[in-house]
Amino acid sequence: MRRLLLALAAVLLVAGCGEPVDTAKVTYPRTTVPAGALPSNDSTSTGGQTPRTNDPAFAPEKLRVLDPCPLLDEELLDQLGSPAENNRGGYSECANYMEDDEGKDLNITLTLGDKVVDADAAEDVIGGLPAMEKMLDGNDACFVTVVTSTSPNYGIVIQTNGGADDLCGAGRKVMTDVVERIRSDSPEYDLARGTLIDLDPCSLFEGDALNENLGGETENSPYNLHWCNWTGPTATLGVWLRLGFNPELGGNGDQVDLGGGIKGFQEKTVSTAGSCQLEWKHRPFAGDDVEIVTLTLDIRELKAGADPCAPAQAIAKTLIPALPKA
């Protein structure tokens, strides 16, 4: 659970840059700001001074299968100080909690394929991509972002924080190197049979598969490369494909049988509205981590005596057979 809370905190901080967020829910619908002012092409060329988006080297399906930790390699981080070991925060996130040349804390977190809600504010350029940076009011964290694609707006984010003197400068340095590496020698995962890494979460349900449980016609929107939300007239569903500690060895909530020997773990909230978070192990990953499917259903008006986890379980039992098999 600690990994999940840390991952959620990191996702929300990067996405919101410090804006207040209700962390009681796991489904976070986002409003995409159209990046119509950003030039777009299908060429890998970065010549000239005009930044371009939608370069195939940074397509969502390409970023989804990249391993972020090799991008924060020792050769790069040595230029900024004394690196520690990398810490994987998810399929597309890696961090290094290092020190700069003066011994001050310099924490660097790389996130691939994050949702960019203010892409039209990207007035700079890094590696041929539209770029922007934001220092938090306390001057203790800087976010450097490049916009890689539009419709939806995705990007790469470098978060730097700690006591180092030039957090944004360090972020720009790392971003410049990361963009170049992705273009020239991108490190991809060795995709194991049955993995969820390369799966587009917004492709999980087809047609009207969710209409009954979400109250009618639904629309989906990606939150990031491994998380998608569906919104219907009466409810919202979020599905997050993630890494974490095996819930079967200490999962939170009540255990439920999802069929086929799969153990689910659910937590629910019931009032005038209702919500249910249901998750289960999909397959082993590496070390203590396993691949996990986390499903969250938020029902806006819950009928008296209704159990919000009943439709969540029904959705899970529909989804499980469609997932890749090991």
Image: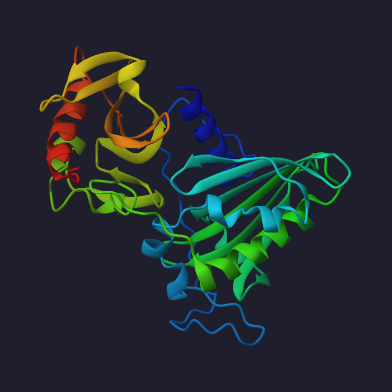
The quadrant in which the N terminus is found is: top left
Most distant residue in the right direction: 102
Tell me if 48 is positioned left or right of 24 in this view: right
Residue 224 vertical placement versus 254 (above, below): below
Work out whether residue 96 can be spotted.
yes
Tell me if 33 is positioned left or right of 86 in this view: left
* Count of picture labels: 0
Image coordinates of residue 142 in percent, x first then y, are 72, 49
Image coordinates of residue 214 in percent, x first then y, are 21, 38
Q: Residue at x 52, y 60 (%)?
A: 155
The quadrant in which the C terminus is found is: top left
Most distant residue in the bottom direction: 48
Q: Residue at x 25, y 35 (%)?
A: 234
Looking at the image, what colour scheme do you see?
Answer: rainbow
Q: Residue at x 71, y 45 (%)?
A: 83
Tell me if 90 is positioned left or right of 200 in this view: right
Work out whether residue 251 can be spotted.
no
Image coordinates of residue 153 in percent, x first then y, are 47, 62
Q: Residue at x 66, y 70 (%)?
A: 126
Image coordinates of residue 20 in percent, x first then y, are 60, 34
Image quadrant where residue 171 sits: bottom right
In the image shown, does 218 or 146 lie closer to the viewer? 146
